[in-house]
Image (cartoon, helix red, strand yellow):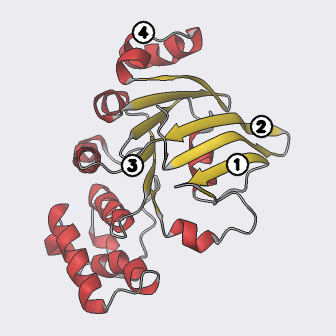
Amino acid sequence: MTGANPVLRLDDVWKAFGDHHVLQGIDLEVAPGEVVALIGASGSGKSTLLRTVNLLEPIDDGRIWLSGADISDPRTDVDAVRARVGVVFQQYNLFPHLTVKDNITLALRHVHRYSRKTADSAALALLERVGLADKARDHPDRLSGGQQQRVAIARAVATTPDLLLLDEITSALDPELVGDVLDLVRALADEGMTIVMATHEMAFARDVADRVVFLDAGRILEQGTPAEVFGAPREERTRTFLSRFTA
């Protein structure tokens, strides 16, 4: 999908760690409100791609654009970019010494300069939405993995980011906890949030994504609608990968 004003655009992006080329000429556009699922084997470059978008990893070549601004320019204000991009990782990365509410309000107060009252009100509304209003004063170690991940998502969307990046957010969860987290992501997608997610949840990608992008050895080997990629993949490598999930 190519939009006139994409939220995210990667032009010929390359990234290597030593002699290992993790991203090899990635071209990708993400339109406003689009949900893009990155699939592929472990080591295919999905997580590294997300980390370059949030400027956690510098790229070796190419350019990355966020809402029309070249964020791969070395002069880019990294903090300003990260204030516009929400990220949720495999591990929840909540601050253990802060309460659930304070984890959510931290960026609102210190980056976006909300008053404590306004930030607290926003956090409590989000916690109500994710079914954790009664956990506002708890610390993360009092929560299950699924609850912690829902708090992490609430924290990521609290600042109303231009783009939400989700990196294998269910991989560290027990199977019975996965459903609640995916339901929350589905709701965000239904509301029009722009999302790029790396996932091994093929059924979820098929049901929620607008576009599925298959990475193999750092390259985009195939992309299309879920019906196209899952129903009639063009590449033999894609068919081989998907056969592990559909057998």
Q: Quickly name the residue at label 3.
A: 194
Q: Disc 4 and disc 2: Cα gap in Å?
A: 29 Å
Amino acid tagged 2:
His
Q: Helix or strand or loop: what does disc 3 sit on?
A: loop
Secondary structure of the residue carrying numbered label 4: loop
Verify CB contact (< 8 Å) between mark 3 and mark 1: no
Front of the two marks 3 and 2: 3
- Coordinates of residue 126 in the picture (x, y in percent): 22, 68
User: SS of the residue at dot 2?
Assistant: strand
In this view, 17 is above or below 239:
below
Q: Which residue position is annotated with label 2?
A: 21
Label 1 to label 2: alpha-carbon separation: 17 Å
| Comes first in the chain, label 3 or label 4 | 3
> Is residue 134 rendered to the left or right of residue 212?
left
> Between residues 190 and 94, which one lies in front from this camera angle?
190
Rendered residue at 56%/66% (across/down): 81
**Residue placed under numbered mark 1 in the picture:** 63
Crowd around label 1: few <14 · some 14–19 · many ≥20 (10 Å): some
